[in-house]
Image (cartoon, rainbow, N blue to C red):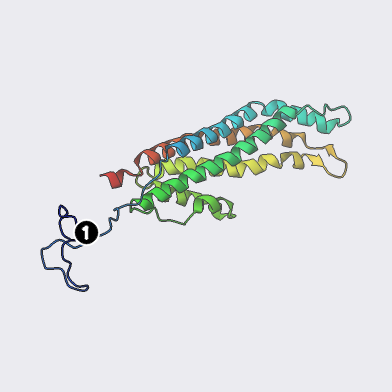
Amino acid sequence: MTTDDPYVAPPTPQPPAGTPTPYGSAPLAPFPYTPAHAPTAPAQGLATAAIALTGAYTAVSIVSALLARSTVEQTKEMLANPDKANPFGNIGSTALGGLGGLVGIASFVFLALWMMRIRKNLTAVGTPAGGPPSVEWWGWFVPIANFVLPLLGMRAISRRSVGWGALLGWWLPFCLVWVLTPLASTASLRAVDFGTGKLTHPEVLDSLVPLTYASTAALVVSWLFLLLVIRRTTARHLDASAS
C-alpha cells in the first residue's frame, strides 16, 4: 500500500543540474520580471503648490509696492522726529515684510521639491535630465554663480517642454529683482547720519518708491513666465516615454 494520490499526476522528471536547455524549448523555470522603467510619482500637486506660493509671494510684493509711498513718509517722520514718532506707524509694512519672508521660504522649498520630482521622473523613465545634480537646492546660495545655476537646473528638467525664451523670461526679471532689492534695502541706511542718528538725506528715501515699483514689476513678469514653465513642464515631462 502506498501513500501516493492516484489522481495527482506524477512529477515531471528534471534533468541533472547543469544540463543545458535544448534549443527552442522553454526554460525550466521562469525568469524574474524586470519592468522597463521604474515607477514615476505625480508632479501635479507640487506644481500647484509651487505656483500658488510663488504667486502669493508676488501678491504680497504688489501690496507692499502700493504702500511704498506711505511707508517712506512714515519712515521720514520717524527718523526726523524720533521722540514724537508713532512706534506703530510702520507696523503694516513690517508685518507684510515678515509675511513675505515666510511665503518666500515656502515658495523656494516647494519650487525645489517640484524640480526634484520632475528630475526623478525623467530619470525613472530613462531620459535623465542631466545638468548639475540637485542644483535646485544648493544652486541658489552660491555667490555670483547663483545668477546662473538655478537657470541651468530649470533648463535641464524643461528642455523637452519649453524653450529658452520662456526660461529667460522667468530668470532675467528675477535677477533684476535680486539687483534692485539690496539697493532699496540700504536706502534707509544711506539716508541717516549715524553720528547723530538724524535724517540727513531724505531724497535717498524717496528713491525707495521707484525702486520698489521696478522690482515688483520685474517680479510679476518673472512669475508669469514661471507659471508657463511649471505648467508646460509638468504636463509634458513624461511625453517622450509615452510616445
Q: Residue at x 71, y 42 (%)?
A: 186
- Residue, far left: 24
Horizontal relation, residue 140 to residue 22: left or right: right
Secondary element type, mark 1 = loop
Of the 4 image quadrants, the one containing the C terminus is: top left
x then y, percent, for residue 170 = 48, 40
Mark 1 belongs to which amino acid? Thr
Q: Residue at x 66, y 43 (%)?
A: 182
Dividing the picture into quadrants, the one containing residue 195 is top right
x then y, percent, for residue 153 = 46, 51
Counting the numbered discs, the total is 1
Q: Of 155 and 21, which appears nearest the observer?
A: 21
Of the 4 image quadrants, the one containing the N terminus is: bottom left
Horizontal relation, residue 189 to residue 60: left or right: right
Q: Which residue is mark 1?
A: 3
Residue neighbourhood size for the residue with mark 1, other residues' Cα within 10 Å, grouped as few (<14), some (14–19), many (≥20): few
x then y, percent, for residue 163 = 37, 44
Q: Of 225 and 141, which appears nearest the observer?
A: 141
- Residue, far front: 1
Horizontal relation, residue 239 to residue 44: left or right: left
Q: Is residue 5 above or below residue 226?
A: below
Q: Residue at x 72, y 40 (%)?
A: 187
Horizontal relation, residue 32 to residue 151: left or right: left
Q: Of 27 and 97, which appears nearest the observer?
A: 27
x then y, percent, for residue 130 = 40, 56
